[in-house]
Amino acid sequence: MNTYYAVNLLVYAGVDIIACLALNLQFGVSGIVNFSFIVFQAVGAYAAAVLSMPPDTANGGFQHYIGGYELPFPIPWLGGAIAGGLLAIPVGFVVLRKLRSDYQAIALLVLSVIANAVITNADKFLGGAAGIALVPPPLSDRIDPNTESYQYLYVGITAVCVVIALVVANRIVNSPYGRSLRAMRERELAATAIGKNPVQLKMTIFIVGGLIAGLSGGILVGFIQVWAPSVWLYPETIILFAAIIVGGRGNNIGAILGALLVPVGFEEITRFLNNSPSIANLGPPGLIPALQWVAIGLLIIGFLWFRPEGVRPESRRVFEGAPVREDR
Amino acid sequence: MDLFVAAFGFGLVSMSVIAIAAVGFTMQFGITNMINLAYGEVMISSAYVAYYLNRAGFTIWFGMVAGALFGAVFSFLLNRILYAPFLRKGTSHLGMVIVSLAVSLMIANLLLPIVGYFPVSYQEDPGRLIRWGSIALTRDQFIIIGIAVVLMLAIHALLTYTRLGKAMRATAANPTLARNCGIPTQRVIDAVWLITGALCGLAGVVAALDSDSFAIANGATFLITVLAAAVLGGAGQPYGAMIGAVLIGMITELSAAAWSPQYKEVVAFGILVLVMVLRPQGLLAKRGALAAAG
């Protein structure tokens, strides 16, 4: 196993963990089925890209995008996070305000498909179908990104972001606010009856999730240095949903476990399969990637049927001073 | 101005295609309470069934019947094998939405290695052009409009005059009460999946015939248009879906003439957003999107 492979794996694992923590806050803890989650990651990536890149007349002007501010390192990532959070406001305003929950899910799914189609067709806005290339890696003006030490540095910065996301997620899950979110998820009407405002609760967690998702996009685009509509098609969200369902809804350890099992573990297995020619050339072209998606679907359905609580179930929270112990 | 009159003609065809699909979708949802996100993929699968029959030398009209049969059997089995057991298990509405999205992903990717990425089209002579002012439609397009009108009348007759249709409406309104009144709701729901599946399959073939070519990726675009029409009319309301189809079909075609055909789905989405902000329950429904999901 060479350094490049290890670094690649670790950065992807970090990005997936951050994304799963964010999605878990929305889907696992609050019950918002955010089928357009990947759009928030994509917005973060695009924002981080255009904030760190030179204007599009550079490099012979072979690509077109708005912005190009060449800002120093932490700003593009923060900008990515803020972009994700900002996008959550109008989306949340339309979707979360008074629609019933299954309508919210389909509206967000449609948004994901449409947003991708719009960015693909608008070729002057963010590079269109070809996307954006040559995104400068963070700190590349000070350290040569092709050195091994830079690779480790990137893993280190990603790890710091993972820790920040985990601390934020933990604080939210264990706070009174997190308790309100779980109450709303379990029975919205009851939560409303004791004075919780479900719209406000959902809007807040939607924006927090958008911020974290945007950050994960910023980290990813700094590492792979390209971003295009083909990497944020709506099935990418389904992989993250599969991760949360497999890992265990509603708890952060479950989300991390799911991120390591599904997006990381799964991708690696199929990469391994694709690298052995006898399997990669099996059947018509594209068979193995297609079967990978089928397996993701089977994983979701299988887990929802046999173990809906996931590998690591959410712990049952019981109030110590309750007059009657509830043993179910 | 002529451009818009011509677009009006295409709008008539579009609304016919959407109406067939949207009525099937909304009846599935209204009676079985199941948002079936695999609907678009069942449509595209049926379109491919007709494509292979067409390539084997059968006419497209035979393909339509075969596509409808395929859609009916496929949807029926989908419900019997997957959705119904999950519902019996007490899976929540949101759980069912996730299951159906997973199914949609699986169908698309099982189909992909078989049919490939490249767009295909039917071998069908669209017939001579029939002109009426600036409106110029082919014989096939007139037949599509005719099929849609006949089907809409048939759905109306089914729901209004037959015992099965009345049982369906009763099941939609209150399944427990319907069962207590002696309506075999299980069999009614089986019938609903067969009928709506047939509409779905037929709509897939008709939509593929109406567009010059189609590819596997069209499953998602079909679904968006159908969702927009169904939600606009008030989800679960067959007559609402018809009105929704008329509006979506006409507006998207007129906008394609005024702006760019690339953005048809975007316009449909814009309408969807407007409806969700201004009248989430849809045009006809009383509760619709506002009611709590069980």
Image (cartoon, rainbow, N blue to C red):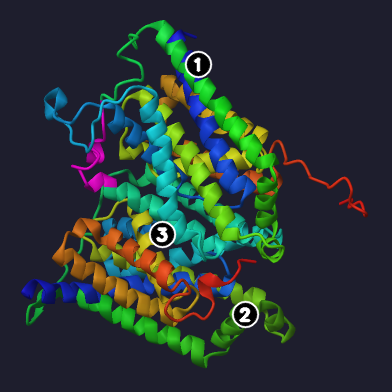
User: Observer-nearest residue: A120 or A184?
Assistant: A184
Pinpoint the chain carrying mark 3.
B
**Do discs 1 and 2 belong to a common subunit?**
no
Q: In the depicted view, which residue is nearer to us: B275 or A130?
A: B275
**Residue A156: which disc?**
1
The residue tagged 2 is: B171
Q: Is residue B139 magenta?
A: no
Question: Which chain hosts label 1?
Answer: A
Q: Find residue A14 and report its horizontal and vertical position in percent.
A: 52, 25
Mark nearer the N terminus (3 vs 2): 3
Q: Quadrant of residue B130?
A: bottom left
Q: Quadrant of the N terminus of chain B?
A: bottom left
B2 or A224, which is in the foreground? A224
1 or 3: mark nearer the eye: 1
Subunit that carries the residue with mark 2: B
Looking at the figure, which quarter contains the C terminus of chain B? bottom right
Query: Splitting the image into 4 quarters, where does residue A166 fall?
Result: top right
Point 38% across, 81% down: residue: B151
Reading the image, the residue beneath label 3 is: B40
Whether discs 3 and 2 lie on one chain: the answer is yes
**Residue at point 46%, 11% (across, down):** A152
Residue A260 is left or right of residue A107, and the answer is right
Q: Position of residue B15 (x, y in %)?
A: 29, 74
* Residue interval drawn in magenta: A119-133
Q: Amino acid at mark 1?
A: Gly
Q: Residue at x 61, y 55 (%)?
A: B95
Q: Is residue A310 above or below residue B202?
A: above
